[in-house]
Amino acid sequence: MALRQAVESRFRAGILSMVRRTSGPLLALFALTIGFAVAESQFATLANLRNILDSSAVPLVLSIGMTFVIRQGSIDLSIEGLMAACSLVFALVVANDRMQFDLGWLGLPIAAALGAVFGLANGLIVTRLRVPSFMATLGIGSTCLGIAMLLSGDQPPLIRDPALRHWGLGQSFGVPNLALAAAACLAAGFFVEQFTRLGRYSYVVGGAESVARLSGLNVDLYKVGVFAFAGLMTGMAAAMESARLGIGHVEIGAGQMLGAITAVVIGGTSLSGGSGSVLGSAIAVLALAVLADGMVFVGATPYMEKAIQGGIVLVAAIVAGWQVHDRLRVVK
Amino acid sequence: MSVAALRVEGLCKRFGDTYALRGVTLEVRPREVVGLVGENGAGKSTLLKLLAGVTRPDGGTMMVRGSAVRWRKVRDAADAGIGIMFQESSLVPDITVAENVLLAHEGSAVRLGIYRWHELFARAKALLVKLGMTISPGADAHTLSFSERQLVEFAKALAVETRTCDAPILLLDEPTSALDERGVATVLQTIEELRTHASVVLVSHRLEEVRRVCDRIYVMKDGSCVGERDARTCTVEALQRLMIGHETGTDFPREAVRSQLAETVCLEVRQLSRRDKYVDVSLALRHGEVLGIAGATGSGCEELCRTLFGIVPPDSGTMLLDGRTVALRGPSDAVAQGIGYVPADRPREGIIGAMSVTENMTLAHLAQFCGRWGIDRRREREVAERWIERLRIVTPCATTRASDLSGGNQQKVALAKWLVGKPPRVLILDHPLRALDVVARRDILKTIRELACDGAGIVVVADALDELLAVSDTLIVMRDGRISARYSIAQDRPTRQTILEKMI
């Protein structure tokens, strides 16, 4: 009851601005979907839409954490290394061909917790040792990659747990299981963003860190919290991808980082911090998945697809900064 | 006699080698409204920031309700019931009004880290209603108008009431500067109501308003309290006299001003306007003339300077250089036209601390020092050394890092940047004397006069009137974006009093 009241009062006031902020990516998503559906009859089939959902599940989970980090004015470049380490640990603690563990579903929270610990390390290095997040996360990411390589050896562990494999590949109610998991993560991310200090203060820290400090907020604490939350999401994404592929692999996160940052920026979060929502990022992830999928249908090669994706990122960045007219605005 | 709500004794604050506060002593009694007035740079804002725990004092004691305190962080002061409203904007743009108002004072509206939005909105609404505001507490802060934002900041300072059971102490830094008549009336009314249970320190440029609402008024000048007056018996004129000190005017000897100025106009602007900043500004600057502009913060004079240098384009109006209409496309265009600009924020915009004195001087005209093989380091060095000598810059050598110089010498380096090339046509100096000691100020003023004698047209914006009077040939006073008075110093030298009346 209290929750309903809270939700109502929050969104009676704020829903309009929320819709306005996400209107850009939403429009892109609709335009792309309708465009491809008209151009290619095979695109709008149930099987293909399912495909799109399935392929956007992992990027979506990653983009949730990344939204928080970018919104507070930091960046997380450790995603790929973190995913590798979490993937290896996940594969080794569930039933596998290398080790005797058989923890089953417990593997998911273990992978997520491990991600949170690495995220915590990111945050502590940024706040305690005062290393810019760009370098700190790059370092932790590389360290994690090393750990993953040690765990992997020359024979990546294969996952032998039938329940997890089925979860990673199957579907419920006609929707891929991983997409459902991603939706649950999105709901959790949205709750944290709108209803907790961690989420609300990430706007304050990113929008005006000096104001946050002058108001007496423990800025460092919330910064560390956001990095840990992002790590949690990354660990979760790693477990999901491993369950799908049935393997713990060092290369599991290859290319995911750029995708996550791209989605967050297209989704309306400014790289300088202070604005944006996980909803916008999620819509952008879907739009990018539709684009990637549709390109194949209309006969584009993967190379062209990359180039077009890059072009879209640039256009989105230009549109985002268009209204600011200050001639002395520093762009770095 | 009850114990004072707030008492400070001998409070000192130093920034680098200049004193912002030198031994301030004052007292605020329970349920008393105390006014704090003084010219720009007198130390009012610095004092408030010390009281609120934003910065720490270098000396002196603070007592709150009879016990000595030493704030380690802002939170300590807030816990003791001290709320502050800052002069500069302290709203976070992308969160709601309610969150801004109750930031760090959410109390029971956040339980176990989870927001109870209805309670948060209700409490913020109550504070907003107190100020006669009808805006929704759920609106995003960036959608507010300028004056709405100021009222929200006031509500934010009031929020400290919800935090402590003691009588709160509110520090208000220019709470009415952006408000219209009605907003001002609301704020003053609210302060009047606060009197029943709180103590208030009010900083304002609007002396009439201070006199009306306060019980006692402290006057600050150059970092110390120079007077304490009963608000009921003192007059605005008496306050102004105290603010500017004795009417001697001998601090800055007037340099030999040439009574005969050149007839040719080097820079002219006609009906220049920019929304919310300045309106209908027309002025003409002759070769060899020093044009002083006096104006309080928010009067638009700083923005005008930035327009003259092409940083912010005007919405309407024309600008002429040597009789030809120009539309500056940006600062580099202005430099190409022979305009130089020394910004007010020296460490951030004026000099590059990590680069050498020489490099700082030549960076705007580097093309002139390029030979066939790139930058001619020797010639660059020679020119720099010539100007170091000419401007009497005290530096170990020409390759010293600029950040190692004293403030006054840094300012000279910033000036020299526009002199190493061909002589500038127009120099725009935005608060060139800010945060400098008296010797450095005098030195810079002398340099400005010398440059004018070489034929440059110079625009100077400054805080302190005696300095402006000493250096200018013509003086313009700006208030609320408009020119409110013009004086030709040689013919009718105005008193500081009359200028101050035109400013505020």
Image (cartoon, helix red, strand yellow):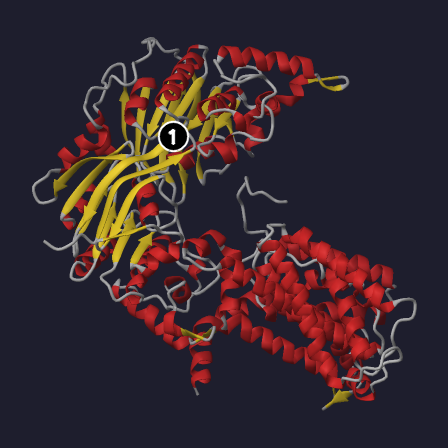
Q: Chain of mark 1?
A: B
The kind of secondary structure element at disc 1 is: strand
Q: Position of residue A36 (x, y in %)?
A: 77, 72
Q: Residue at x 61, y 58 (%)?
A: A124
Give the answer, above or below, for where A274 lies relative to B370: below
Q: Position of residue B125 (x, y in %)?
A: 32, 70
Give the answer, above or below, for where B427 lies relative to A51: above
Give the answer, above or below, for where A91 lies relative to A65: below
Image check: B325 left or right of A137?
A: left
Q: Which residue is mark 1?
A: B18
Task: Say few, some or many: other residues with alpha carbon within 10 Å of mark 1 (under 14 / 14 to 19 / 20 or more).
Answer: some
Total marks shown come to: 1
Residue A125 found in image quarter: bottom right
Q: Position of residue A107 (x, y in %)?
A: 74, 80
- Can residue B339 be seen at all in this image of the molecule? yes
Q: Amino acid at mark 1?
A: Thr
Image check: B90 left or right of B169?
A: right
